[in-house]
Image (cartoon, rainbow, N blue to C red):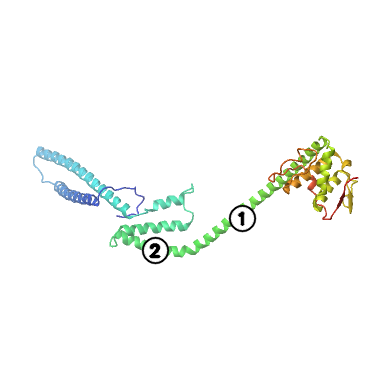
Amino acid sequence: METMDGPVPEVRTEGEPAVAEELGQNVDQIIVKVDELEQRLNEVEQFYSKPGKKQSNTSKASSVMKEKDKDKQITSFKRRQLDASRREAAATKRMQDLMRQFSVIEKPMDFSTIKAKMEAKDGTGYNNVREICADVRLIFKNAMKYNDERNDVHVMAKTLLAKFEEKWLQLLPKVDEEDERRKKEEAEAQLDIQLAQEVSHAKMARDLSAELEKVDKNLKELRDVVLRNCRKMSTEEKKALMTVLTQLSPEDLNKALLIVAQNNPNFQATGQEVDLDIDAQSESTLWKLKFFVKELLQGQGKSPTSNGGNSTMNNNVNQNKRKRESIDAQAAKPPAQKKNNKKPS
């Protein structure tokens, strides 16, 4: 049976192999019987198709013609019956061949399927010409596998496969060239996509930076408003703050002095000796220093010292949280120079 004519429906067989073999024998017997009947029918047609002897009697000739017409109708009817039987037997034979085909061929393929995949516009088609080549090879190999080596179909499939391989070798350099061109185009397209993403993310980063700067500015303004409206620091709180400042490292002390200088232009934070009058500082400066000291000690895992029972200075340290009230005070990095701090007398 030839397997290269077109797509065949999938057929599933059930039962023992002996049943299929018996079915095949019955089909063969029916075909032989139909051939015998067809031969006998041809003999009958040939007999009646010969010119008969002339009849002298007109009525007798008319009767003979009617009989011949009747016989022809009977013969035509019998022929139609034989044709129907022959078609049914052939269909049964094809069904048997199909059952055998799907037990031998693991992956059916035909030229109609190849053509449909080549013309597909929905993304289900071939990705490259090498896939087409593989399916064409599969058609010929299936035909050779299904049909015996002495079968004409096997011989023709083998011959066509050899011709195809010969033509394919001639086209292979162009195929390789096309593959290289396609890979280059894909690489360029991927690079364009990457560049577009980088440009998009760069713009996003600039926008985020601008938004963050705006948020920082708003926070600074809000903090200034809060500091201007905050309560006055008590004397005990000032003493506790001064005690903590005297215990800071030189680098942290520089940062604290810069906070004072930001709100007091006359304050010299870069001298060899610096006199800090805690009572002369504004409330906003005092609270900024207090926030700075609190964050600093929290980062070191310590608790701020307080003599006045201030709840803000006595909170437990939480190393996983950082407040943003003193962002503006820590923006500038002070020079690494030791400073002396004198308490007011």
- In which quadrant of the rendered image does the C terminus lie? top right
Classify mark 1: helix, strand or loop.
helix
Q: Residue at 82% across / 45% down in the picture?
A: 243
Which residue occupies the extreme front position in the image? 307
Q: Residues within 10 Å of mark 1 (few under 14, many from 20)?
A: few
- In which quadrant of the rendered image does the N terminus lie? bottom left
Image spot of residue 212 (x, y percent): 73, 44
**Looking at the image, residue 204 lies above or below residue 158:** above
Kind of residue indicated by mark 2:
Lys
Q: Is residue 17 visible?
A: yes
Image spot of residue 135 (x, y percent): 41, 56
Q: Residues within 10 Å of mark 2 (few under 14, many from 20)?
A: few
Kind of residue indicated by mark 1:
Leu
**Looking at the image, residue 5 lies above or below residue 81:** below
Left or right of 203 in this view: 93 = left
Between 39 and 175, the one lying in front of the other is 175
Image spot of residue 337 (x, y percent): 84, 55
Q: Residue at 69% across / 48% down in the picture?
A: 205
Decide which of tag 1 and tag 2 comes sooner along the chain.
2
Q: Is residue 326 visible?
A: no
Between 262 and 254, the one lying in front of the other is 254
Q: Are marks 1 and 2 in contact (CB under 8 Å)?
A: no
The residue carrying mark 2 is 163
